[in-house]
Image (cartoon, grey):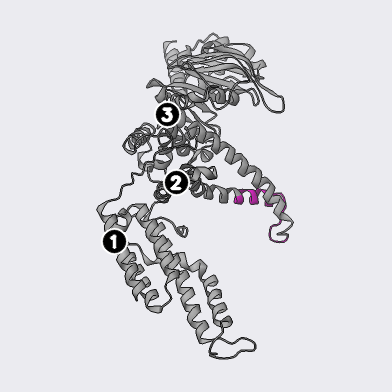
């Protein structure tokens, strides 16, 4: 669906943000991107959404080159991006108006706009907040409004740039659950985060450092890679616990390390077995 | 929390249901009429017309008084200026000040005109959703050759919408910056002038960053400043034409009074 070919990008002060990056994102994939500050994650998000053009190389979204201005409208329909701060993404005075902003830009007739808004509200569970000001909602609900604003344009691919970093843990989990639900419905997801724990269920994890891809693979192989520590990333607590138990001869299967509940159930099962 | 002045009050009255263009045009015409008439009968007729519309809107009167109250000092100042600085038959004499009968009349008329303008504007904003107002303005501006000025009616409408939506965020940022600077020992009460740069510089930096983030979010949602549609379906109904006809009759009546 999205293809990056030898993409490089440097900031005006000369700092390289991306260097010769190659990446293929398939339809329906859930890709997690992680890395330290300044590793190029957000620049990658902007490149994937066509908001930033590569200085060398090219980004192809469904065979549409992001450097071609005539293709921008088509790219916007296919790829949506949600940013870190929900407050600076609100355009409308009410949730309904905010959600209508994207479809209005696509020049849809009012009846179609209402349909898009209704669908996006239903998908994010925000129906009861339709006439409320998005600024009056909690951080988690606000981020859901930002997500619904993008969903109202019916994109196939959604990019999330550290969307849970400004939220409390409970709201963060709720937002992540909504994203996983969208993935199950067939949306392609690119999820950028600082927190490896959020990527347990991803199809593929990319670890970035200084604008380059340092590690790539499915979560199980990435989490067990020894170079993870050298990249300054710490393992999710349940994975770390499973690794420690492994050293004592207790093996917890990978799929049981996704939630504390499944982990506890597996421990109980092993305990009862012995 | 008290609602801000000139805010929208949802409702289902006949006035609420009118097309925003009808209401905008009516307020503009009534505004011109307010400053065109020069007799008390006309002014009284305009007040009666306003109260009739206010009753029709079903809105509480406090909505309108709230719109006038902040301007009362300014209106009173205008009244006094007219009273004391208009030549005519003196009513009394206080030191160099000689209030005149003609000044009293002019002062009353001018004050009444300002109050009427505020009341009609409050009637428009209280009975019309702000985005419907901007949508109405956009539709009214669309036939004008704005492209010569380098803007489009769509851009103007978006600018208006975003200004309305972003004001609370701006106020919040001012408060947050003030609190952050106060925590670092800046006294905004003792040194109001010295503390201005301490507030203005981080505030400006923050506002520019917010604007950049907003621009990026808007661009990602397909905004290009060119033609766009609206969720608000505007169409002139029979009631709109009837309202405009009644308005025209009223204007003729006031002009012949």
| SS at badge 3 | helix
Q: Which residues are magenta?
A: B174-190
| SS at badge 2 | loop
Q: Is residue B102 magenta?
A: no
Q: Is residue B179 magenta?
A: yes
Image location (x, y in percent) of residue B238: 25, 53
Q: Identify the residue at image location x=37%, y=53%.
A: B21
Residue B245, numbered circle: 1
Q: Does the CB distance between marks 2 and 3 fall below 8 Å? A: no
Name the chain under label 3: A
A199 displayed left or right of A55: left
- Name the residue carrying label 3: A178
Alpha-carbon span between mark 2 and mark 3: 24 Å
Residue extending furthest left? Answer: B238
Image location (x, y in percent) of residue B109: 46, 76
**On screen, B94 above or below A138?**
below
Residue B209, numbered circle: none
Categorize mark 1 by other alpha carbons within 10 Å: few (<14), some (14-19), many (20+). Answer: few
Q: Identify the residue at image location x=47%, y=37%.
A: B226
- Name the residue carrying label 2: A93
Image location (x, y in percent) of residue A228: 62, 15
Sooner in the amino-acid sequence: mark 2 or mark 3: 2
B155 displayed left or right of A132: right
Alpha-carbon span between mark 1 and mark 2: 33 Å
A15 displayed left or right of A57: right
In this view of the protein, which residue sits in the foreground, A274 or B113?
B113
Label 1 in the same subunit as label 2: no
Alpha-carbon span between mark 1 and mark 3: 52 Å
């Amino acid at each position: 669906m999205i293809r990056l070919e030898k993409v490089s990008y440097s900031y005006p002060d000369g700092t390289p943000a991306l260097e010769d990056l190659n990446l293929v994102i398939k339809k329906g994939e859930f890709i997690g991107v992680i890395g330290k500050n300044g590793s190029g994650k957000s620049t990658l998000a902007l490149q994937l959404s066509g908001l930033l053009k590569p200085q060398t190389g090219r980004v192809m979204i469904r065979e549409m080159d992001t450097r071609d201005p005539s293709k921008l409208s088509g790219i916007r329909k296919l790829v949506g991006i949600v940013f870190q701060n929900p407050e600076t993404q609100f355009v409308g005075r009410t949730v309904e108006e905010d959600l209508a902003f994207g479809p209005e830009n696509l020049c849809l007739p009012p009846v179609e706009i209402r349909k898009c808004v209704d669908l996006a509200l239903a998908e994010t569970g925000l129906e009861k907040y339709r006439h409320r000001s998005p600024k009056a909602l909690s951080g988690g609900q606000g981020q859901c409004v930002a997500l619904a604003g993008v969903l109202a344009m019916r994109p196939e691919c959604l990019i999330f740039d550290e969307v849970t970093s400004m939220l409390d843990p409970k709201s963060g989990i709720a937002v992540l659950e909504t994203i996983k639900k969208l993935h199950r419905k067939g949306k392609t997801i690119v999820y950028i985060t600082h927190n490896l724990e959020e990527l347990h269920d991803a199809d593929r994890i990319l670890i970035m450092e200084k604008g380059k891809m340092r590690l790539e693979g499915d979560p199980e192989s990435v989490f067990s890679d020894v170079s993870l520590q050298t990249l300054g990333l710490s393992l999710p607590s349940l994975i770390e616990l499973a690794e420690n138990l492994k050293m004592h001869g207790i093996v917890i299967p990978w799929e049981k390390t996704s939630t504390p509940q499944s982990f506890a159930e597996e421990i109980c099962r092993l305990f009862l077995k012995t | 929390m008290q609602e801000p002045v000139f805010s929208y009050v949802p409702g289902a009255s006949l006035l609420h249901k009118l097309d925003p263009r009808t209401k905008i045009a009516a307020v503009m015409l009534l505004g011109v009429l307010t400053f065109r008439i020069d007799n008390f009968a006309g002014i009284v007729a305009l007040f009666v017309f306003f109260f009739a519309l206010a009753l029709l809107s079903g809105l509480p009167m406090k909505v309108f008084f709230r719109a006038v109250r902040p301007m009362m000092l300014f209106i009173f100042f205008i009244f006094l200026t007219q009273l004391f600085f208009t030549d005519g038959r003196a009513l009394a004499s206080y030191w160099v000040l000689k209030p005149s009968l003609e000044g009293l009349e002019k002062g009353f008329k001018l004050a009444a005109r300002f109050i009427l303008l505020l009341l009609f504007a409050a009637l428009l904003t209280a009975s019309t959703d702000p985005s419907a107002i901007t949508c109405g303005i956009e539709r009214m501006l669309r036939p004008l050759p704005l492209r010569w000025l380098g803007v489009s009616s769509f851009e103007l409408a978006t600018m208006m919408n975003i200004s309305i939506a972003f004001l609370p965020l701006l106020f919040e940022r001012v408060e947050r910056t003030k609190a952050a600077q106060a925590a670092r020992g800046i006294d905004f009460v003792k040194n109001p002038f010295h503390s201005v740069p301490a507030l203005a510089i981080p505030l400006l930096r923050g506002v520019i960053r917010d604007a950049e983030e907003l621009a990026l979010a808007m661009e990602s949602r397909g905004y290009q400043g060119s033609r766009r549609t609206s969720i608000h379906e505007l169409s002139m109904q029979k009631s709109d034409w009837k309202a405009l006809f009644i308005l025209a009759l009223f204007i003729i009546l006031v002009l012949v009074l």
